[in-house]
Image (cartoon, rainbow, N blue to C red):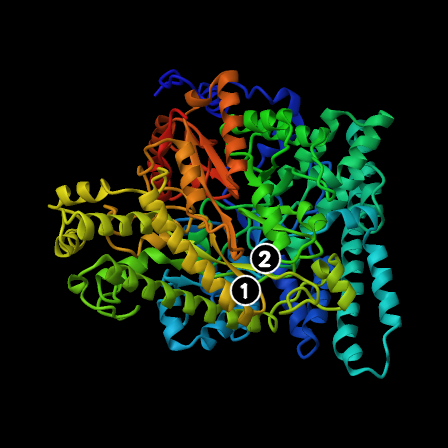
Amino acid sequence: MTRFTCECMSPQEQRLYEKIEGKEDRFRETHSRVFKMLEKFDGQKPRIDIERALYFTQSMQETEGQPLVLRWAKALKHIAENMTVYVQDDQLLLGRAGCDGRYGILYPELDGDFLDIAVKELPNRPTSPATITPEDAAIVVEQIAPFWKGKTFHEKLNAALPADVHKLTYDDPDGLMSRFIVNETASFRSSIQWVHDYEKILKRGFNDIRREAQEKLDALDPLSPKDNCEKKPFLEAVVIVCEAIVHWAGRHAVLAREVAAKESDPVRKAELIRMAENAERVPGEPARDFWEACQSQWFTQMFSRIEQKTGTTISNGRMDQYFFPFYEQDMEAGVLTEEKAMELLECMWVGMAEFIDMYISPTGGAFNEGYAHWEAVTVGGQTPDGRDATNDLTHLILKSKREFPLHYPDLAARIHSRSPESYLWDVAETIKDGSGFPKLINDEEIVPLYVSKGATFAEAYDYAVSGCTEARMPNRDTYTSGGAYINFAAAVEMVLRNGRMKKYGDQILGVETGDPNSFQTWDEFWNAYVQQHLLFLKAAFHQQYLINKIRATTFAQPMGSAMHDLCMKHCIDLHQEQIPEGINLGYFEYMGLGTVVDSLAAIKKLVFEDKKLTMQQVIDAVDANFEGYEDVAALLRSAPCYGNNDSYADAIGREIDRISVEFGGKYSKDLGMHNDVRYVPFTSHVPFGKVVSALPNGRKEFTPLSDGSSASHGADVNGPTAILLSNYNTKNYGMRDRAARMLNIKFTPKCIEGEQGTEKLVSFIRTMCDLKIWHVQFNVINRETLIAAKKDPQKYRNLIVRIAGYSAYFVDLSPDLQDDLIARTEHGAF
């Protein structure tokens, strides 16, 4: 394939084919520093650095019996004092959590019970592999893993689950393999997605937070049992962790001065001295200029990654808001240029690209293919008083996203009804670049929902995107437990197989709802599905109840708590079950919406209403995986489908949603949280599909389910606006117990070519906003390019695609996920 095969290419495709032809990247000259750094590690298989795990384990061994939050702080102090620090060539920011190059770190408090097995398999596992030296592997096996056997959250949860919940959760007695039916996600991360109040650190610094904690400590009642048993350990932990991060920064300053003393290039020498000066001040003290602000945020972000494994990585919050005062001040003073500001930001992007958020467990790896990352930078949106928040830094970050050659950071653009045309145009031009950025998040859906759940308007207006499609309100959000992923496509199969699944033989996993041939009406079939659906929800909520209890005894987050107003006010760690005045926003995941709706619509229409098929014909066809039943498959696929603004299919989707929302509204109270329905699978619609046999929508056995709130593969035939309308029509807007919906749209570059194409895309974005669609993300790429990349991965090493709230290299994905992307409907017109 030559670069001229496609009628029209995205800018990313054009750069890709220019590289294949041996041409230099068009942005290399204006971004020379970051290109030099990138070329040292881009494409490397990540290496596991064990220092964090080793020093964390050493400290935890020495502090057994002490309060958990205090032990965690002491472990972070031990890490800060002993882990290797680095000064990298060309970098302008200091601070990393591991070795040079592309690296990942270990969290034995999560994976310790099987870490010794996992490190041996890491280099050769099919998805997201990593290298580890024999010496380091020996330390993991002999020194780290043994301490954690019997102590991990995963082991506690596995032992606590009752048999009826366990059989839907795990596929083995030890809970190492998921059943992929009602899947827990809490055991491969210490917390769900999170975003800190970075502005607090830029304005106050950790020394001031330490001072506040010490004053509270000194004021405790020496005779109070609560003060001494609960508040005292927490405040002591805050003091320790604040000192730890300042000490860690200081070690970088010392090393930078040592490197500067040996540097012969006067320009680099001056940079190193300035970097040392920055690290001597921040994050202990308030930042004074843009460079110090970037350094302070970066130290905070990286030490957060050392503190715990947050699902989807620690996000960056509203960077165009909290950095803007420093940017504006320095620009007005003439000490900063747009080019220098972008260079500093892109030094941060490089640091993010080097850190790989490794998932050691097999289930975690399957959920997050292609070295998933969600260190979301949020731009746009509204100010706390409800005015448009876009500024010059918003546009600079969007420009950086079009020119920076890697898929870091993840970028989220907040949209609202009064978003300026200039902002939406810039967002549309960035989407057209073709690397999947930015994803769009809708204020018109999120702000009212958050207010209905207890937030003030000021808090809701100030939310930051965190993770895939989620939003966080710093200083008000307090919930950190991972939620269940529920495979509702399996519920459809269980109706057809009387509570069983082909994958698992004669084992009864669901409700024995009877022989489906005995159903005389659609209502009987629907009620059977509802029984399976409710069984799954019951298991998920039972699972979540235990998770919330056990996590509070297993994880602590002293640094994250130190940055949270409510934790400091009440002297309580963020991982505890209840933080007074906090809002606990959690979720359970609906997997396979389009697959389920289309399957149910086909049964209702063709079996019970039009009577074109008998139930036995459908069962025979799915049992045979449609081999020899191609005519039946074609007829099933002709039924009304979700994603086409078809009221028949969408009414079923809305009823499914209602059941989930009502269940959440009723039983979340037992959990002390909002456990809301969400439609965000990451890449898990692929492994979840591998346990589900053929279904009545014509889908073949063990193939991917529909992802998020997107249509089934190839089922959306009425254009992208119809998908938005189906999304709108399947929500229950009169109820509040709902969370994010992820929606993937794939355009051909030709469809949005030129200024006219940009205008169409801006109009599409405004429609998404008006319909209160929570999230939309885009791939703008030619199908031929994806097919060529699968055939010749070495040539297409740099091809970036949008997956599930993040972008990744196409060639890093499994063949199944590559095929899933290729199969998504390609829209060539609006």
* Residue 631 image-quadrant placement: top left
x and y, in percent, of residue 814 in the image: 38, 44
Q: Amino acid at mark 1?
A: Leu
Q: Is residue 815 left or right of residue 624?
A: right
Task: Using residue 327 as the reference point, say whether residue 699 is left or right of it.
Answer: left
Is there any visible trace of residue 272 in the rendered image? no
Q: Which residue is mark 2?
A: 309
How many discs appear?
Answer: 2
The answer to whether the residues at label 2 and label 1 have Cβ atoms under 8 Å apart is: yes
Circle 2: element type: loop
What is the spatial separation of the Cα atoms under label 2 and label 1, in whole angstroms?
9 Å
Residue at 62% across, 67% down? 555
As drawn, 58 above or below 719: below
- The amino acid type, in three-letter code, at marker 2 is Lys
Which residue: 33% across, 63% down?
Answer: 530
> Which label number is shown at residue 110?
1
Q: Position of residue 739 (x, y in %)?
A: 52, 52
Q: Left of 110 or right of it: where is 126?
A: left
Point out the tag, 2 or 1, that comes first from the N-terminus: 1
